[in-house]
Image (cartoon, rainbow, N blue to C red):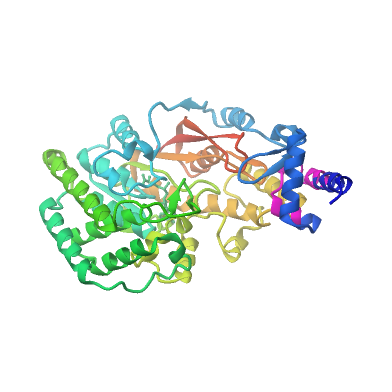
Amino acid sequence: MAAGDRTDFAEAVHAALGESGALGATVRQLATQLDDRPGRVESALANLARRGRVRRMGRGLWVRREYEELSERDDFADPAEFVDRFERENGVRLGRYEGPITFRSNEQLPVHRWWPYVQGFSAEFVRGILDRYPPAVGGSVLDPFAGSGTTLVEARRNGWAAEGTELLAPAVLAARVKTNFELDPGVLERRAERVLRLTARASPGTLPFLRETRRQFAPGALRDLLRLRDSLPAEGRPENEALRLAFGRILIPSSRLHRSPCLGYSRGRIPDGPPVRDRFRAAVQEMAKDLRSLADERSRWGPRAVVERRDAREGAWPAESVGVAITSPPYVNGMDYVMNYKVDLAWLGYARSYRDLAALRRAEVACDNLPRAEASPYLGTATVPDPWLGEILEQIRENVQKKGTYRRDDMHAIVHRYFSDLVPVLRGVRRALVPGGRFVVVVGDSLIAGTYVPGDLILARIAHALGYHIESVEVARSRRSGQRRSFSLRESVVVLRKP
Ligand SMILES: C[S@@+](CC[C@H](N)C(=O)[O-])C[C@H]1O[C@@H](n2cnc3c(N)ncnc32)[C@H](O)[C@@H]1O
């Protein structure tokens, strides 16, 4: 191609990018817009980037240099504006939460490490909240989005009755096993050895339904995992559940997959790791070791925790039974839990088809992979659970329309449904709390289609409208937007009190 043609094409790419303004565009979107090859667009962008005219913002998003800052756009309401407005309208100034909040600090901790759940919060955080707001005698601890059971483990270890609801079956399994402190470590180890002996004679059974399985595992590891899966005893007895959890835990490390935090895979050769049987044995031995050390604290344990696989939106917890509720719901436009845990769901037999995965996704709090039909009742923005949300949804809708090529054109409906999903949970927890009881929620904000969404503040405002008092909002950490790496988001601890 002649140099002149190349320059003309780069200018065309620059102009096309200009139409998406501060929202930016991906290579694929530009290629569709210009009806050209993605490879050609990519080299034009690289050329423009060398000349400082465009910039890559993360997750493949490109913007023109003059739009690097979102605040260059007149209609952009930034985090600080919402913080001021929250203080004016709700009378609460944002504070700071000190201390580790993410699951990372659990990875080495006894019991919590049995199933690393990137989306979990830290045990230290839960302990801190239980110290701050200890339930009165007779009041229990509730986690409506219990995940892998961090709240329930810490509550039970410290003497409280604890209950949780969760929809993702592998997480329910983890929470049940982790709160069963009575598990006998000796029996567990003996059963694991029996299973390993059985695997030696088993022939590899059928692959899980996920299409990409063969590409994700080395052939030898795949055969060993299938043998191990088919040798596991059926669910039911507590030790059997623990063995299934140990199996679930070794799946991702035995493959080319990783969670960082979304499920992805590395290209090239699958690195050799320890054999599957050694990984399984090590996972069980770690459990047994933790159970032995836990037994020393037996006199402090609370009663057995109740973990139900149930939709938190049903909100049917007994009235005035809960002293403190501690949770972290999915974040606005955050994780697709079904996509992220499909390997565990399929291998452990909780999902048998893509249809099963879709059904689970419909029940989970809305994420941006929600089927269109599920979002369509939320396309209108006339009735929303908070007035701020009305403005924000309109802005998202406008931005998506302007851009024309956004991932989906009903993004505002997803955000609308997300907050609507939280309403029955807030209502149910309020009913379940004793007067004066707290609901402590760890939640984040988001950037969606170039619109800032203060998820923590909107949740607090909706809760206020439902009869809670907003006691505090404390910022625990900042994190980067996946859409725009340079844009700083936060994670907050919202404390709500039932009057
Ligand atoms: C941020 S995670 C909670 C992690 C937990 N705090 C921990 O430490 O493991 C949010 C959880 O909400 C669950 N979830 C989403 N929608 C739900 C619903 N409608 N009912 C119950 N759980 C739901 C997800 O499956 C996910 O496990």
Whether 53 is among the magenta residues is no
Q: Residue 288: percent from the left, percent from the top?
A: 17, 48
Whether 25 is among the magenta residues is yes
Q: Residue 436: percent from the left, percent from the top?
A: 35, 36
Residue at the image position 66 percent from the left and 53 percent from the top = 381
Q: Does 215 sit above or below residue 435?
A: below
Horizontally, residue 323 falls left or right of residue 380, namely left
Secondary structure character of the magenta stretch overall: helix
Horizontally, residue 261 falls left or right of residue 239, namely right
Residue at the image position 71 percent from the left and 44 percent from the top = 24
The image quarter in which residue 257 lies: bottom left
The image quarter in which residue 202 lies: bottom left
Residue at the image position 59 percent from the left and 51 percent from the top = 415
Q: Which residues are magenta?
A: 14-31
Q: Residue 203: percent from the left, percent from the top?
A: 27, 73
- Viewer-side residue, 481 vs 131: 481
- Viewer-side residue, 290 vs 401: 290
The answer to whether residue 3 is visible is yes
Residue at the image position 61 percent from the left and 63 percent from the top = 372
- Viewer-side residue, 478 vs 131: 478
- Viewer-side residue, 270 vs 288: 270
The answer to whether residue 310 is visible is no
Q: Residue 406: percent from the left, percent from the top?
A: 69, 53
